[in-house]
Image (cartoon, grey):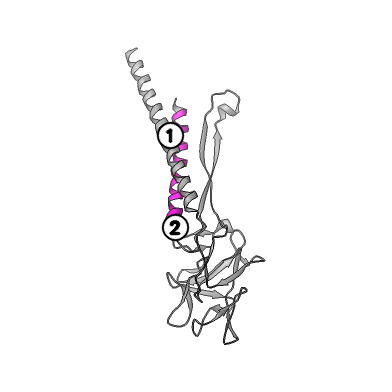
Amino acid sequence: MGSGIYSALSGGIARMQKMETSINNLANAGNIGYKASQLSFESLINDQLQNGSGKGMNYCRTASRYIDFSQGPLVETSRSLDLAIEGEGFFKVAGEDGFFYTRQGNFRLDGEGNLVTATGGLQLVGGNGPVNLPHNDVNIDEKGQITADGVQIGQVDIYGISDIQSLNQRPDGLFALDGDAQEQPAADGARLHQGSLEHSNVSVMRMTTQLIETQRAYSAYLNTMKLYSDLGEKAREIGRIG
């Protein structure tokens, strides 16, 4: 009976973690360039069952937490400083804490003409340093070449990451290098779209359905734990009477 309640407890904890992940994804579904977090689970069977006694219990735990980097929908804005990446890759931005990577392309010009993120004012970085523009009436082609009045004046670069799952996703939508992640050239086929933004890749309908199903499973595990607890209390009462 003790093993049963611990099995239900492990399942309940796993479902609670999944609920938290789903809620966080839904909270960020409206954020430009957001990538959904996901969990994968594994079942553990204790040694008794593996040794063939048939008395083992099945336990559940989180095997890994990963980021879904699938493409989000591109939405046209017709704003010249809005940029979207189609394919794999990131914009590189610089702040007081160092360099970060992002899919958020809703840039603006600061007082010095630097192209910066809409939130936080981090400078967009190209191969030659910060991207500086004389004004916002510019053309940016799919390879990132910036022209004004027919003259090239700058470059927006797309950066690849060697071990993408080692990136640390921050609450502000930025990614930081971590673990084995290394900056590298962008993948073939990655291109820019001026006047468009990549929305989050969270499907609100699918994520809401997943959350409801997970809440039901979590409630079922709680009920199972209560059942085991009640049975244990009754067994102790019978033992005291005997």
Q: What is the span of residues highlighted in magenta in the rendered image?
A: 3-28
Q: Which residue is mark 1?
A: 220
User: Where residue 88 sits: x, y (%)?
Assistant: 61, 63
Q: Quadrant of the N terminus?
A: top left
Which quarter of the figure is the C terminus placed in? top left
Residue 123 placement (x, y as % from top left):
48, 74
Please tell me whether mark 2 sits on a helix, a strand or a loop.
loop
Magenta span includes 27: yes
Residue nearest the observer in this picture, 226 or 140: 140
Q: CA distance from mark 2 to mark 1?
A: 28 Å
Q: Which residue is mark 2?
A: 28
Q: Is residue 134 above or below residue 48?
A: below
Given residues 54 and 188, the one toward you in this image is 188
The image shows residue 58 at horizontal and vertical percentages of 53, 32
Residue type pointed to by label 1? Ala
Which corner quadrant of the image does residue 161 belong to?
A: bottom right
Q: Badge 2, how many Cα within 10 Å: few under 14, some, many 20+?
A: many
